[in-house]
Image (cartoon, grey):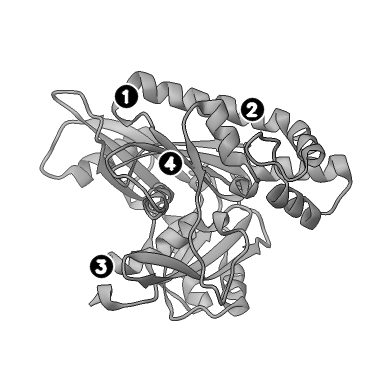
Amino acid sequence: MFWSRKTGWIGVDIGTCAVKLAQVERRGQRYFLRNAAIIPREKMIDTGGWIRSIPVSSSNEIREGRAITGFDGKDSACTIPLSVCDVRRISLAETSDMRSTVGEKLSEIHSVRTDNIHFDFWPSATSDSRDKNDYNVICQADRWTNQVLLDYRTAGLNCRVLDGVPFAIARACSMIDGFDTGVPYVAIDWGGSSTTVCAVAGSKPEFVRSLPGHGFDRLHKKIGSELGIQPSAVRKLCSEFGLANSREIVDEDVCEVVTEITSSFRGDLIEEIRVTLAHLHSRMKKIFPVHGIVMGAGATLKNVDAWLTDELRIPFSTWRISTRSTTPVAGVELYGPAVATSCLAWSGA
């Protein structure tokens, strides 16, 4: 039985800037990060639009990640960047074959044949129309699916599931201690090249918005440029000192410098998140968040949760997972979606 296994699949989060691998262990009802690796991409993925995006191989990064540490098995699941996907909500009347109905609607919207795309859909919990239902839909060009499958074969892995990023984010949220399925959350995946805002209700994604150009790498490079320090020093500065906050300050002068240098970038991001929350409040009050979770590269910035709490008036926490004491992993905040895909080993997929 799949529930009896102790080790998850190899979870792979294919990003625009890097490829992350993670594998978890299950002990009772708790999960622990067993192995993890992050490999910068040899070639960046174009974020110019999902229909026009040309697939980029990730096989070298996957192979290098597997070689770094002791990942077990060949079964795997992965996500690909939202920048090469389309995520939207559509309203449709119920039919006996909703998959065909959704496919026809996507074909009409994007002027593409349904056999040239792969898509999944799920009903929204916020539908309020009497004659139509709202569906969340995620789709990608089939050339990207084919590229991922080729990369897996080349890297010697068996791709069991191609997971949608919104589902991976929601699943990662549900893994944190104290997660309450009865209340809505907002998850902010502050990645290297972009940020994803995902409203989560009942452990499922209910609304997703991608914010291209609002990635943590811009902030990271700004600090390095202003202070004349190397990326490794910037990472240490962010993780050990971070933002000035009355709750926890390691060195007030250093934190004030980081806060000042990053002020403009953070302000732009906050405004976009506020726009998203305002939309939820006006159109989908049932899923307006009670709690927030931040993950990704931006979550490695010390005191980022306190900053988000103060700015958005929603209590935020930073996503984390316990690691095996024998194999401590730095920057666990980076691995939320990869960990979530590893956990699909227990889903019966």
- The alpha-carbon separation of the residues under discs 3 and 4 comes to 27 Å
Q: Which residue is drawn at 80% across and 41% down?
A: 254
User: Quick one: 116 or 161, which is closer to the camera?
Assistant: 161
Whole-angstrom CA distance, mark 1 to mark 4, is 24 Å
Q: What element carries label 4?
A: strand
Mark nearest the camera among 1 and 3 is 1
* Labelled disc at residue 271: none
The numbered mark, 2 or 3, whose residue comes first in the sequence reads: 2
**Residue placed most toward the observer, 163 or 245:** 245
In front of the other: label 4 or label 2? 2
x and y percentages locating residue 92 in the rendered image: 21, 31
Location of residue 288 by image quarter: top left
Residue holding disc 1: 285
Q: Closest to the observer: 191 or 327?
A: 327
Q: Nearer the viewer, mark 2 or mark 1?
A: 1
- For disc 2, the marked residue is 268
Q: Position of residue 257 (x, y in %)?
A: 80, 36
Position of 304 compared to 321: left or right? Answer: right
Q: Quadrant of the N terminus?
A: bottom left
Q: Name the residue under label 4.
A: 86
Q: Determine whether label 3 and label 4 are within 8 Å by CB.
A: no
Q: Using the numbered discs, state the Cα–Cα distance from disc 1 to disc 3 in whole angstroms.
A: 33 Å
Amino acid carrying label 1: it is Lys
Q: Between disc 1 and disc 3, whose residue precedes?
A: 1
